[in-house]
Amino acid sequence: MSRLSRRTFLGASGSVLALAAMGRPAFAQSADIRHFWWGNPERDKRTLAVIDIFNGKNPSIKVSGETLGFADYFTKLTTQIAGGNMPDVIQQGYGVLFEYIANGAVVPLDEFVGKSLDISKIDQSAIDAGTVDGKFYALSIGANSHMAVYNTRLFEEAGIKVGEDFDPYGYTYDQLAEIAAEVKKATGVPGTDDNTADYQNFSDFTVQKGANLYNEDSSYGPTQEIVEEYFATWEKIRNAGGTPAGAESAGLSGVSDLAAQGVVTGKSAMTYLWSNQLVGIQGLMQDALGCAMYPNTAEMRPGSVVQPSQFVCLTRDSKNPEAATAYMSAFVNDLDMTKILGLERGIPSQSDVRAALQPQLSEVEARSVEFFDKIQGKTAALTAPPPSGSGEVEQTFERLAVGVLLGERSISEVASDFVSQAQAILRRA
Amino acid sequence: MQKFFARNFAGYAFLTPWLIGFFLLSIGPILASFYLGFTKYNVVRPPQWIGLDNYAYMLQFDQRFWKALQVTFTFVVVSVPLKLIFALGVAMALDKGIRAIGWYRALFYLPSILGGSIAVAILWRQLFNYDGVINSALSLIGIDGPYWLSDPKFSLWTLVVLAVWQFGSPMLIFLAGLRAIPQELYEAAEIDAASPSKKFFAITVPLLAPVIFFNLVLQMIEAFKSFSGAFIISGGTGAPLDSLLFFTVYLYNEAFSFLRMGYASALAWVLLLIIALFTAIAFWTSKYWVHYENERG
């Protein structure tokens, strides 16, 4: 969950205005298709432009866009499922997609493949990621991985030489503690966010420790020892003096709004996100951002995975699945459209789309392509999708870990409480 | 019957818009939620009857349910009396014949109009942020302000302040009540050389009791239902450490974050029963301290 910010609020109302301005008289026979996604101002601008192109090329179909911030997206979708009026085309993430498929809210695409829907150029791995029990459900719109971004100006001012003092693709938590403290000493800005209450970092750490987040039988993977070690690792970084105050970090726990992140607000020099968010977050600040993987333990066992960032899916409420899949097909294949979408949702899964984007990549997009080249061979295998209840486990982690950040409870107390609550949540789900 | 309609027609005419809304929009969902409270329902699949399981789980196993009750009760018990005292104080100050009194009244009422809005909650967050206005002001007098919103020791109190600040509607009602107190009583008291506090406790409070009671019931219900401030300031989760886990926020979380609509419906009915119970208690105690002028004896 994230907080509603003034920025997303303005962004949302801006897109409503943009939609109103784009309205044009519909043809009597036209098929109305609704596309709903969670976004940020940058993504909304690009997606609405792409819808405009599609409508221009296909006079018999009229696509309209709807957008919300991530925090409110699934709430709205839930009420739409209950009301039987989901949009035709929805955006889904790797986490929750499988719950929607299991419950029948998202329908298979197989009958449209080769007709209205062209998947001939999509990477096999991306098709596999959207396939469940032999049926193809979800079109990947980009690959994604965990990425740390650091403020290059602050790192330079602290005299940290990237490549010598700091290897963005292979640094340890101990090194991070030193670097962060140096940045703080030289610039006054804490060198890194404090990820004690960050579930994304914790999931990475779990895999680095040789465990999985969820076992085959949907029980919870991380043991109390792993949770304790994770908290202790960040406590060490915090005690070295390179992080914002505990209460400050507590306020950021679970906040996904890019504008609130430490590198943007100037409250830290390093923030941890998804790689596709680089374009969005760089757009909010002046100083150039450098890319790095998440920190690792001394054993350097890979913890991050590469996974589809987002999918477009067809819902069971679509009245016009041919038109909807024709739009989905163009969304991932039409070179005029993918050119505008760029890399904002991740690295596209079609080789021809990637090739077409190559010459026109903006400088920041080139940086995220380079990041993907560099992490090859340093990532872990994609594990089974998270079971029902995983969203609640994540929120529980963030809530309890705040107790560690504020020094209200001991690490072992919180760790044992969390593991038992996580198991209970998964049993109940 | 005819007489009844003739007498009450105007009243019902004015109520019509509300009645239409109630029967068309509210009654259906209310009854549906009563049924859903006995089911497991995740919105996507049809509801599944589980009898009293939701209520049993709530009382036996759900720690957050008890935490939510604790937070909500603390909020009600602290914010309602403070708000009423504050509202009465301002009403008494405004009851004097000062110039441009209408302007003052409108001005003091303004926060109540804005009160429940998202905009004010966001503004509140900006004010109480660590580097917000409040702490900047404190730093001028050399105080390093705390993290009002992310420290569980303080977070609830910022919402109490927000509630007290929205004293406008009880204030207006108090003002009308004060106007209805006959001036002769005060004049008579002055002739007997009664002190201001004597006048307040022997004349103002007893004669205002029905109005105080009315405000108390209304504000108590309002406080139990309070949602938007806690939702915005806690980012929708009741954070930090569930210190802002108002009952309504917890209910919303269960319904929309975790898709347990059946459980959330059961929670909603528990809240309804709690509000009904406390309103009933208030009415029962009122026999002992509220006296109406037209009562005999």
Image (spheres, rainbow, N blue to C red):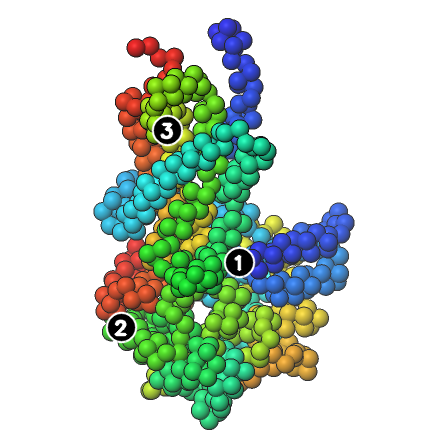
Instruction: Report the chain holding disc 3.
Output: B
Q: Which of marks 2 and 1 is nearer the N terminus?
A: 1
Vertical side of B174 occupied by A75: above or below:
below
Q: Which x, y percent locates residue A264?
A: 53, 71
Q: Which of marks 1 and 3 is in front?
A: 3
On screen, residue A44 versus residue B267, left or right, reads right
- The 10 Å Cα crowd at callout 1, few under 14, some 14 to 19, many 20 or more, is some
Q: Mark 2 points at which residue?
A: A228
Badge 1 amino acid = Ser
Rendered image quadrant of residue A57: bottom right
- The 10 Å Cα crowd at callout 3, few under 14, some 14 to 19, many 20 or more, is few
Instruction: Report the chain holding disc 1.
Output: A
Q: Nearer the viewer, mark 3 or mark 2?
A: 3
Badge 3 amino acid = Pro
- The residue at 31%/58% (across/down) is A425
- The residue at 38%/85% (across/down) is A178
Badge 2 amino acid = Glu
Q: Is mark 3 on a helix, strand or loop?
A: helix
- The residue at 33%/67% (across/down) is A405
Labels 3 and 2 touching (C-beta < 8 A): no
Q: Mark 1 points at which residue?
A: A5
The quadrant the N terminus of chain A occupies is: bottom left
Q: Mark 3 points at which residue?
A: B196
- The residue at 29%/75% (across/down) is A232
Vertical side of A198 occupied by A25: above or below:
above
Q: What element carries label 1?
A: loop
Tell which residue pokes out farthest to the bottom in this image: A164
Instruction: Report the chain holding disc 2.
Output: A
Q: Which x, y percent locates residue B130?
A: 44, 62
Q: Distance between the residues labelled 2 and 1?
A: 33 Å
**Residue A384 shows which numbered tag?**
none
